[in-house]
Image (tube, rainbow, N blue to C red):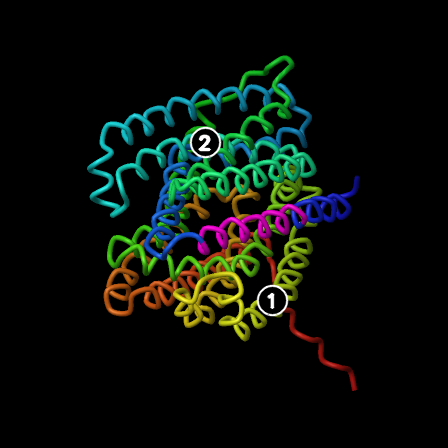
């Protein structure tokens, strides 16, 4: 299959996965919003985002490393190295997750006092971290193999289980624990189904474990921590500086803006393994700029109409799917919409920097953006609550985009905006 057809195939399956995930996610969060008060809703949102942060940390940077190296090894027909890499990654991840789970079980009350969520929620968050890490790691391995169809099917089953389990426990009176148990069940189902589809059988081949750890895993680990703190840490920060009600309001606005962010992220996910394969050979690397340019422009073309539609009908959308108490979220739509689009486009460029082997540049950009974000977010949240967080997100996203564009233009000679040729007289 040609690179162009593979990009289309990957994109098609990931867009279907995005549509299903968005629809199921909307049903999940709307169901929670209808049956829970903003404070309880904020507990679920905070626990979920805390789990996302720590699951990223527990992966130790192996996720994106697997995604790149599996595609690169396959391009060079080194299947034995792929098998060794997968086995090596699972050993490390299981150990790191057991350590984090033990910390959550032993220091439940302390974590509760820091995050402002109940001890029971903290207890279940520990198990959510383990399940989420396994689901994410097996999913990224599938990405490396470009098994997008099987990824879609495993995601579908996980999402269905999440809604069924959440609904059952909510109606049984489990309150905020209902959606949390739904998330845990979802991640576990995904992890098991994906693991069964991963190719672990075969003769392994020696890999430079130390080299992989130093050149790929360690920089990826630092970058992943920074990225996760930036994207998910905002919810935890808002809860810590304000309250769970403010986080609940902000979460509703962010949920509606997910399509704006996911469109460039989905296309980036479809391109990443191809970019890794193309960059492995000099003869094919020259195709990358045109592919990135195509994906970038298509992302803008599709995302902007969706963004404008959601901004215009913000109050109607909130009243349709949520309670009237969430109407203040409409004031956040413009700021979060613009920030989401800029962040998505910046991430597209930044991911391709990683794909072509500029691992440390990728890491440095994430570190710089995260430091700037927390520097400006703390005072702005204290002064303007959730709106201050939205503004901080927008400023940081713009910085991420500009730095990513500067570096990818330097290494690939990429020009997103082409100047029109002057007409000859």
Q: Quadrant of residue 296?
A: bottom right
Say left or right for 232 vs 280: left
Q: Residue 295, image x and y in percent?
A: 65, 56
Q: Which mark is residue 131?
A: 2
157 or 103, nearer to the observer: 157
Q: Residue 139: percent from the left, percent from the top?
A: 56, 35
Say which of 294 and 281 sits in front: 294
In percent of width and height, residue 201 lies at: 63, 15
| In the displayed structure image, the side of residue 23 where residue 257 appears, left or right | left
The residue where tag 1 is placed is 306
Q: Is residue 17 magenta?
A: yes
In the picture shown, does residue 365 fall above or below 246? above
> Start and end of the magenta stretch?
16-34
- Which secondary structure lies at badge 1? helix
Q: If you read the primary sequence from the N terminus, does the residue marked by circle 2 or circle 1 appear first?
A: 2
Residue appearing at x 61%, y 36% in the figure = 157
- Residues 220 and 313: in front is 313
Quadrant housing residue 225: top left
Q: Which mark is residue 411?
A: none
Instruction: State the image coordinates of residue 11 (x, y, percent, origin top left).
Output: 68, 48
The question of residue 32 being in magenta is answered with yes
Q: Residues within 10 Å of mark 1 (few under 14, many from 20)?
A: some
* Secondary structure predominantly adopted by residues drawn in magenta: helix
User: Is residue 202 depicted above or below 221 in this figure?
Assistant: above
Looking at the image, which residue is at 45% across and 20% down?
A: 91
The C terminus lies in quadrant: bottom right
């Amino acid at each position: 299959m040609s690179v162009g057809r593979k990009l289309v195939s990957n994109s098609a399956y990931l867009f279907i996965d995005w549509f299903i995930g968005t629809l199921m996610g909307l049903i999940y969060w709307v169901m929670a919003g209808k049956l829970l008060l903003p404070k309880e809703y904020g507990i679920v949102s905070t626990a979920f985002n805390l789990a996302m942060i720590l699951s990223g940390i527990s992966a130790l940077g192996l996720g994106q490393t697997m995604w790149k190296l599996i595609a690169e090894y396959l391009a060079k027909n080194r299947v034995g190295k792929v098998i060794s890499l997968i086995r090596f990654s699972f050993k490390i991840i299981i150990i790191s997750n057991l350590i984090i789970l033990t910390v959550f079980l032993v220091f439940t009350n302390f974590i509760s006092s820091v995050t402002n969520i109940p001890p029971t929620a903290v207890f279940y968050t520990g198990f959510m971290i383990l399940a989420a890490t396994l689901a994410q790691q097996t999913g990224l391995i599938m990405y490396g193999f470009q098994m997008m169809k099987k990824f879609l099917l495993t995601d579908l089953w996980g999402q269905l289980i999440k809604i069924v389990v959440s609904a059952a426990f909510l109606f049984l009176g489990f309150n905020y624990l209902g959606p949390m148990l739904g998330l845990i069940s979802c991640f576990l189902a995904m992890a098991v189904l994906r693991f069964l589809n991963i190719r672990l059988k075969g003769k392994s081949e020696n890999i430079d474990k130390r080299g992989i750890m130093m050149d790929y895993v360690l920089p990826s680990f630092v970058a992943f921590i920074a990225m996760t703190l930036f994207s998910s840490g905002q919810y935890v920060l808002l809860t810590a500086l304000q309250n769970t009600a403010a986080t609940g309001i902000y979460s509703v606005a962010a949920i509606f803006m997910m399509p704006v962010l996911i469109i460039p992220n989905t296309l980036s996910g479809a391109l990443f393994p191809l970019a890794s394969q193309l960059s492995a050979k000099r003869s094919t690397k020259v195709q990358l700029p045109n592919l990135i340019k195509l994906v970038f422009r298509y992302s803008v073309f599709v995302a902007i109409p969706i963004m404008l539609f959601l901004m215009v009908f913000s109050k109607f959308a909130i009243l349709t799917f949520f309670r009237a108490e969430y109407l203040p979220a409409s004031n956040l739509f413009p700021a979060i919409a613009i920030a989401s689009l800029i962040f998505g486009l910046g991430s597209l460029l930044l991911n391709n920097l990683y794909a072509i082997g500029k691992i440390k540049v990728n890491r440095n950009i994430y570190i710089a953006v995260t430091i700037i974000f927390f520097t400006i977010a703390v005072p702005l949240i204290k002064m303007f609550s959730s709106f201050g967080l939205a503004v901080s997100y927008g400023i940081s996203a713009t910085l991420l985009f500009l730095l990513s564009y500067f570096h990818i233009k330097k290494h690939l000679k990429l020009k997103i905006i082409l100047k029109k040729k002057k007409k000859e007289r």
